[in-house]
Amino acid sequence: MPNKILVTGGAGYIGSHTIVALLENGLEPIIVDNFSNANPDMLERLKGITGRDVKFYRADCTDRRAMRMIFESEKDLKGVIHFAALKSVAESILQPGRYYQNNLNALWTVAEVMQEFDIPNLVFSSSATVYGQPVELPVNENTPLSPPTNPYGNTKLQGEQYLRDLVTSGAAIRPALLRYFNPVGAHPSGLIGEAPLGAPSNLVPYITQTAVGMRQQLTIFGNNYNTPDGTCIRDFIHVMDLAEAHVACLQHLLRASDPGVETFNLGTGRGVSVWNAVTTFEEISGKALPYQFGPRRNGDVPAIWANVDRAQEVLNWKAERSFALALEDAYRWQLKAAS
Ligand code: NAD
Ligand code: UD1
């Protein structure tokens, strides 16, 4: 029997790609999603890629009764990947209560119900945002954390701390905190990808939407940073590499016997500038991208990229796909979505 894994937020961007990777690796994912930021047609799309009907529950992770019922029905779960969260930085500044309520309550509820049902293995979606303005580059997992610049980031920092406190309390839970850098790209089929509601705030969706004419032009936020070309530097990781890291992490947790918290940076280990992203996109698409330089965006850090040695050593995983491929896949997805 394949190992059953509950995937909260499994209909979302990173979750849906992870469902594909779990199935490809012989695991049996079960989705829980309230579809607050996803479309139920995701299940058909997943079937189009994998040929499989993925079991799903429409439920809210903050709803303890609903979560208990799911765990009751899925008795032999081997672990949980907890993606479910609200993720818009801008929205979190306007509606902090909604973000703390949803993101922290969902994590508390999932972690508590896991303990009730004796399921220790928990993979938690954290973010490089917990490094705030990093004090060294590249950042490794022991680089001191600094306050994020927005409520969304705070929910990730507090989520991590809650899981550490749980382990310290002796709770039978084994969390892995995955700090994602900048997930980009899409499945090569073009059937699933990132579909932000309204105008995107992240760079790559903005680039691809501009390229297909949905946006007039890209504004590059700042060209006077202390970086080689004056624009910010990020560690962009292909979402399929990220998805595969979740499989590696789960397999690691399934093998592990000691309780404890483990933390992994998930990036490529390479920094790419915003300007580089624009020119690489122009090369792979053969299109000139309309852009302008604008002022810096509040809260942006000039540069951040990951040291990914720990993930390679412990999980035997490293990102394999290039940034150009991620842009190619993102563009294919955008062209299909726009057609
Ligand atoms: P997403 O919005 O596409 O996916 C999140 C999913 O969770 C959505 O399908 C949404 O409907 C669902 N959801 C939200 N709250 C829920 C709740 N209370 N109950 C049930 N379902 C709920 O986001 P994503 O980009 O796939 O991100 C997944 C996780 O990774 C999130 O925790 C996010 O904060 C984290 N993360 C994302 C990025 C990124 O750049 N995308 C970077 C770092 C961390
Ligand atoms: C942002 C969030 C981070 C979150 C991550 C994934 C902030 C401060 N940080 O990270 O908490 O985890 O998204 O959702 O919002 N850029 C432009 N023009 C654009 C869009 C972006 O120049 O239209 C630049 C930004 O200034 C930045 C880089 O592109 O330098 C990457 O931006 P983005 O994709 O939003 O990711 P982060 O800011 O790294």
Image: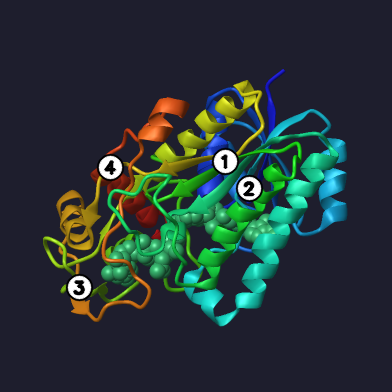
Residue at mark 1: C-beta within 8 A of ligand 1? no
How much space separates mark 3 and mark 4, taking CA atoms? Answer: 22 Å
Residue lying at 66% horizontally and 23% vertically, measured from the top left: 257
Q: What is the spatial separation of the Cα atoms under label 2 and label 4, in whole angstroms?
A: 36 Å
Instruction: Relative to 114, say whether 195 is above or below.
Output: below
Residue 208 place in picture, x, y as percent? 31, 61
Marks 4/1: CA–CA distance: 21 Å
Amino acid type, mark 3: Tyr
Residue type at mark 1: give it: Leu
Question: On residue 291, which mark appears?
Answer: 3
Looking at the figure, which quarter contains the N terminus? top right
Q: Nearer the viewer, mark 3 or mark 2?
A: 2
Q: Position of residue 105 (x, y in %)?
A: 72, 61
Q: Amino acid at mark 2?
A: Arg
Q: Position of residue 207 (x, y in %)?
A: 29, 63
- Residue sticking out furthest to the top: 1
38 to the left or right of 314: right
| Dot placed on the residue nearer the N-terminal end, 4 or 1 | 1
Q: State the residue position of label 2.
A: 164
Counting residues from the N terminus, which is met first, the one under dot 1 or under dot 3? Answer: 1
**Labels in figure, total:** 4
- Which comes before the other along the chain, label 3 or label 4? 3
Q: Residues within 10 Å of mark 4 (few under 14, many from 20)?
A: some
